[in-house]
């Protein structure tokens, strides 16, 4: 008897399962949706669009009234529901013959030997072989290989993570008395530490004791200007 699963479900993307989740998402979602990231939640039956994911931290999803009837599932349940298979170093993939020729023509003798050993003439290879090619490539070609095979690599977030700094120091980013020297409070700029915020450990919080304005000056430089309330 087949296990019964929730009709409305979500699963959190992690470093370990991202490739598998995203591979399935690409088979069902519209092509315009490209911003699925680690710590986002893959889900079915999104009431707002056909992206098949929630674009925010899982804590935010759990507080969103539109999703209060969604239940978290395990990776094993996800595989049962979607018939997904885990990606591994030995997972077979296919690249075009033209792309294989491009790699070969740009290769050193040692890299050519690697390609001959790990890629078939028709472009058949594995995820692990792509990783190996990336490891022996120069910096210019590393970026090209990642761009050509995004499903073989974990996504690189463009955002910063200030969590380690907060753990080792505090949410205030300036030394003690620095604010006083500037005529402000020491906590006038802090790392955002509200875990329900979209910018948890990703951005800076400006003290509400002051007015803040982001302006472009006469030198075309963006300037953050505090004023007294």
Image (cartoon, rainbow, N blue to C red):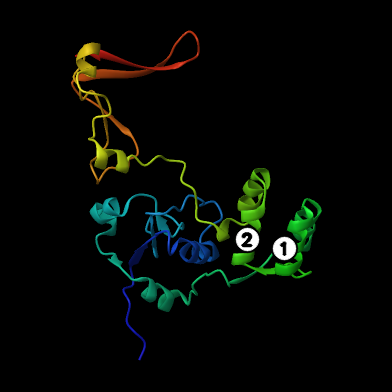
Secondary structure of the residue carrying numbered label 2: helix
Q: Are marks 1 and 2 in contact (CB under 8 Å)?
A: yes
Q: Is residue 87 left or right of residue 67?
A: right
| Image point (33%, 39%), residue name | 162
Res. 6 mark: none
Q: Quadrant of residue 122?
A: bottom right
* Residue 55 appears in view: yes
Res. 132 mark: 2
> What x and y, as percent, mark residue 143?
62, 46
Q: Quadrant of residue 97?
A: bottom right
**Quarter of the figure with the C terminus:** top left
Can you identify the residue that label 1 sits on?
114
Reply above or below: 84 against 33.
Answer: below
> What x and y, as percent, mark residue 38?
41, 54
State the residue lying farthest toward the front.
110
> What x and y, as percent, mark residue 88?
53, 70
């Amino acid at each position: 008897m087949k296990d019964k699963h929730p009709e409305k479900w979500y699963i959190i993307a992690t470093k370990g399962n991202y490739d598998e989740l995203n591979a399935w998402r690409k088979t069902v979602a519209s092509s315009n949706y490209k911003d699925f990231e680690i710590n986002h939640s893959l889900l079915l039956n999104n009431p707002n669009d056909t992206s098949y994911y929630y674009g925010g931290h899982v804590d935010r999803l759990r507080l969103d009234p539109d999703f209060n009837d969604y239940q978290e599932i395990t990776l094993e349940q996800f595989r049962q529901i979607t018939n997904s298979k885990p990606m591994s170093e030995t997972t077979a993939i296919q690249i075009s013959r033209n792309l294989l020729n491009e790699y070969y023509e740009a290769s050193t003798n040692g890299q050519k030997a690697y390609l001959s050993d790990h890629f078939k003439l028709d472009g058949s290879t594995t995820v692990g072989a792509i990783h190996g090619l990336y490891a022996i490539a120069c910096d210019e070609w590393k970026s090209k290989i990642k761009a050509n095979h995004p499903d073989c690599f974990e996504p690189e977030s463009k955002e910063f993570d200030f969590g380690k700094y907060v753990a080792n120091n505090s949410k205030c980013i300036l030394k003690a008395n620095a604010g006083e020297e500037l005529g402000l409070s020491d906590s006038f700029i802090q790392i955002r530490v509200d875990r329900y915020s979209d910018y948890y450990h990703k951005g800076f919080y400006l003290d509400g004791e002051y007015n803040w304005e982001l302006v472009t000056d006469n030198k075309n430089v963006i300037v953050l200007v505090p004023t007294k309330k």
